[in-house]
């Protein structure tokens, strides 16, 4: 990871650096050649004006113009040729082709009023420029051919390029070193995370990670530690779950054994006592069966939402049926069941599983209520979710226990739960069903003032 980070940083930093260098060199080269071309144009135009003004082609002021030609030749370390309208060379600064005829494509174009662009000869490192000589009426009377050396420009350009290359390479080395340092500093904390993950994979949950540095790294550290704490909690919950399962399954069997041994050790057991003990044994067997069924249901709920049997369900009718079934149970303790529906709600869900979930909530509201109390179930919906609230006037849940009530086998008052026949799995099953429907459940309770469970379920469950 460190090498890849260094490579990416190097590419993103160094490549643009050399692209910028190449662009700047191109601009510098263009600027140098453009300025030289403008300079040649200005000097040539001045010479052309003097040739016309001093009647050079008429044989006047020849020495003056020749001196100007030689000066121009000296300035550009090249060659200056003056040609009249008949393509006859009137002056060659090299004195090789004086009074000879010269015809070139660029010269012909210039004589015809189409002065060509300057031509650069890479072999001799020179630029050729042809400038027309026109009189005051705009008539072309001849042309000036200048071959100017650009060796000084080339040397300047190469010097600038070498210097910029050295500077760019220096910056590149610095950037690579900085990228290496940053890469190592950035990846070092992740190596610690990798070590911690390896320890977790080996079953050790006792080591937290404390990373210092960038805010993002500290955020990752906090998130990792939160995940680690969650894993610790899950591991503790798993161990507690195994312990609770063993205890819950063993308790009825122990009771049955005690009752059976009592019957076997007594001679001539009265029929009444025999029936009482057998009734107790039946109740313990029923309790054992209830625990096993709840465990099987919970294991089934742990499967994916793909196991849902989705149909379009009238939630109002489903809740009415649940309350109708539980009314006799509530009537034994004179508890009033009330259903409040704000609108008709149709939802795509698993009717059997949701019925079980809401039944568990209403049953708990009845079991842990006061005699003569009330249980209110309300239904509402918006464009995306439907909401079911189950409120009661019961004993409430202490605040410190509210985040644990959905754990398997967790019971706030174990003695009271045993009296009411609870297994400690109902709320765990309910939460799993809600999560299978991509929903959410939360509780709000105050001790001795009642409890409210709020369930939110999407109107359409994705499968």
Image (spheres, rainbow, N blue to C red):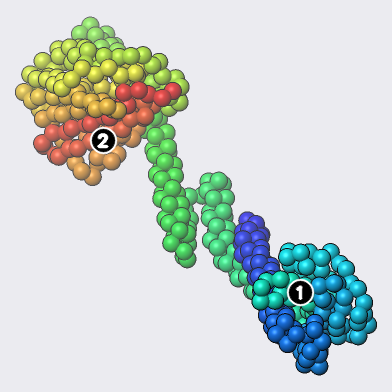
Relative depth, front residue between 186 and 112: 112
Quarter of the image where one finds residue 278: top left
Residue 120 is left or right of residue 183, and the answer is: right
Residue neighbourhood size for the residue with mark 2, other residues' Cα within 10 Å, grouped as few (<14), some (14–19), many (≥20): some
Q: Is residue 49 visible?
A: yes
Which residue carries the number 1 mark? 141
Residue 291 x %, y %: 34, 22
- Looking at the figure, which quarter contains the C terminus? top left
Q: CA distance from mark 1 to mark 2?
A: 101 Å
Using the rendered image of the protein, determine whether residue 161 is visible from the camera's viewpoint. no
Residue under the point 25% across and 12% down:
279
Indicate which label's residue lies in the foreground, 1 or 2.
Answer: 1
Residue 27: horizontal and vertical position, in percent?
Answer: 66, 70
Q: Quadrant of the N terminus?
A: bottom right
Instruction: Name the image quarter holding residue 233.
Output: top left
Q: Nearer the viewer, residue 418 or 37?
A: 37
Mark closer to the chain start, 1 or 2: 1
Q: Residue at x 79, y 89 (%)?
A: 60
Please indicate whether residue 267 sits to the left or right of residue 331 in the image: right
Q: Residue furthest left?
A: 372
Q: Residue 266, relative to residue 24: is it above or below?
A: above
Q: Which residue is mark 2?
A: 442
**Secondary structure of residue under mark 1:** strand
Residue 44 picture quarter: bottom right
Q: Nearer the viewer, residue 134 or 150?
A: 134
Under tag 2, what secondary structure? strand
Give the residue displayed 91% in from the left and 73% down from the top. Answer: 101
Q: Where is residue 418 shown, x and y percent of the image?
A: 24, 27
Q: Which mark is residue 106?
A: none
Q: Is 86 situated above or below 339? A: below
Q: Position of residue 424 (x, y in %)?
A: 30, 29
Q: Residue furthest top?
A: 271
């Amino acid at each position: 990871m460190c090498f890849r980070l260094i490579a990416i940083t190097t590419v993103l930093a160094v490549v643009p650096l050399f692209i910028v260098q190449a662009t700047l060199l191109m601009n510098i080269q263009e600027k140098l050649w453009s300025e030289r071309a403008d300079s040649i144009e200005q000097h040539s135009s001045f010479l052309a004006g003097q040739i016309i003004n001093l009647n050079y082609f008429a044989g006047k002021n020849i020495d003056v113009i020749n001196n100007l030609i030689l000066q121009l030749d000296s300035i550009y370390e090249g060659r200056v040729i003056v040609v009249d309208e008949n393509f006859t060379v009137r002056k060659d600064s090299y004195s090789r082709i004086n009074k000879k005829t010269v015809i070139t494509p660029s010269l012909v174009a210039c004589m015809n009023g189409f002065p060509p662009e300057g031509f650069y000869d890479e072999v001799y490192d020179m630029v050729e420029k042809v400038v027309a000589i026109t009189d005051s009426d705009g008539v072309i009377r001849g042309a000036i051919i200048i071959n100017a050396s650009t060796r000084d420009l080339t040397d300047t350009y190469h010097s600038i390029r070498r210097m910029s290359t050295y500077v760019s390479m220096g910056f590149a080395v610095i950037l690579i070193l900085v990228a290496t340092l940053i890469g190592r500093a950035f990846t070092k904390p992740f190596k610690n995370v990798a070590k911690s993950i390896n320890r977790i994979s080996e079953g050790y949950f006792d080591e937290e990670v404390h990373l210092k540095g960038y805010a993002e790294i500290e955020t990752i550290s906090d998130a990792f530690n939160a995940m680690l704490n969650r894993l610790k909690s899950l591991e503790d919950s798993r161990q507690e779950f195994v312990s609770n399962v063993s205890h819950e399954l063993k308790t009825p069997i122990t009771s049955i054994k005690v009752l059976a041994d009592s019957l076997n050790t007594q001679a001539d057991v009265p029929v009444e006592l025999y029936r009482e003990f057998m009734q107790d044994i039946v109740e313990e067997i029923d309790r054992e069966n209830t625990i096993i069924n709840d465990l099987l249901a919970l294991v089934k709920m742990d499967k994916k939402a793909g196991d849902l049997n989705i149909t379009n369900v009238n939630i109002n009718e489903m809740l009415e049926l649940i309350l109708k079934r539980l009314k006799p149970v509530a009537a034994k303790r004179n508890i009033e069941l009330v259903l409040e529906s704000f609108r008709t709600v149709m939802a795509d869900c698993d009717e059997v599983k949701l019925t079980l979930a809401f039944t568990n909530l209403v049953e708990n509201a009845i079991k842990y209520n006061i005699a003569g109390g009330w249980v209110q179930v309300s239904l509402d919906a918006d464009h995306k979710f439907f909401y079911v609230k189950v409120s009661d006037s019961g004993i409430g849940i202490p605040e410190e226990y509210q985040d644990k009530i959905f754990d398997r086998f967790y019971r706030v008052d174990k003695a009271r739960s045993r009296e009411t026949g609870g297994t400690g799995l109902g709320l765990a099953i309910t939460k799993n069903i809600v999560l299978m429907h991509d929903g959410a459940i939360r509780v709000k309770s105050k001790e001795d003032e009642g409890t409210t469970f709020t369930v939110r379920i999407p109107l359409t469950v994705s499968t």
